[in-house]
Amino acid sequence: MKACLLPSFFLLCLVNISHGSWAQKTSDSFSITIKAETQVNGNEFIIDIYKTSSFIKVIYHLRDSVCYTEMKKSPNYTHASKNLLDEFAKSPRNQDSLNLAANNIEHVIHQYGVYSSDSLKINPHTYSAYAKLLDSINAASSEVLENAKYNKNRVVLDGTQFDFIITWGNNSRKVHAHSPDARSNPLLHNLITETLGIYRQIKPGQFLTAKRTSGY
């Protein structure tokens, strides 16, 4: 199915309507969103994971294209692109401000993306190892997940930027990783590979290929 991607909070509301109020569930209930972008080839994929004591819902999104015609009509795009050009023109450039401006452009592009989506609903008791992995991610500190001390001098040319948003009740936190692997970010890498692997095991085919997920 192809469509402009719904905001994550709206997807969360749909789950709430179908399965009761998310905020009222126990600490076993939380969500993890994985956002990955590879600038070299334009790949982007997003995975929304919702875990409760009775089910795990995983929604996979692959970006197929961007509605550039509509995007360029947007005042948000006009403002963001002007801001980025202004930051580039400054001398000396402020890298933090430049990164923020680039992120704002990417946010607008994301809003006008056209995505193919598919989903799974699995039993946490049947997939107990995966359920425990999700619990480990939820319980781990951001410092442990990002493993900044190990990655301090790690250099990756290009690669894939990952953001992980962990939400429970009305709280959330965000962690970042650049091309995570089994040594740089073991828990996050395991989350990515296991989440993709479950889909490929249950629904083998051409949708979630390694080419579409930047080699993961």
Image (tube, grey):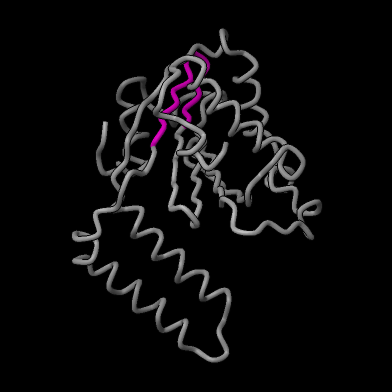
Q: Quadrant of the C terminus?
A: top right
Q: Residue at x 38, y 78 (%)?
A: 83
Residue displayed at 53% across by 23% down? 26
Q: Residue at x 50, y 24 (%)?
A: 51
Q: Nearer the viewer, residue 116 or 6?
A: 116
12 left or right of 29? left
| Picture quadrant of residue 9 | top left
Q: Per the image, is 205 magenta? A: no
Along the viewing direction, whichever of 170 and 47 lies nearer the viewer: 47
In the picture, the quarter occupied by the N terminus is: top left
Q: Dividing the picture into quarters, in which one does residue 63 lie?
A: top left
Q: Position of residue 27 (x, y in %)?
A: 57, 27
Taking the view exactly as shown, the residue that stands out farthest to the top is: 126
Residue 12 locus on image (x, y percent): 37, 34
**Residue in the foreground of this view, choosing between 87 and 175:** 87
Horizontal side of 121 relative to 68 (left or right) equals: right
Q: Is residue 60 magenta?
A: yes
In magenta, the rendered stretch is 49-61
Assign the magenta stretch its main secondary structure.
Answer: strand
In the rendered image of this protein, does residue 123 appear above or below residue 177? above
Q: Residue at x 47, y 16 (%)?
A: 55
x and y percent of residue 84 in the render?
A: 41, 76
Asked if 55 appears above or below 150 in the picture, the reply is: above
Spot occupied by residue 97 in the image (x, y as percentages of width and height):
52, 76
Corner quadrant of residue 86 = bottom left
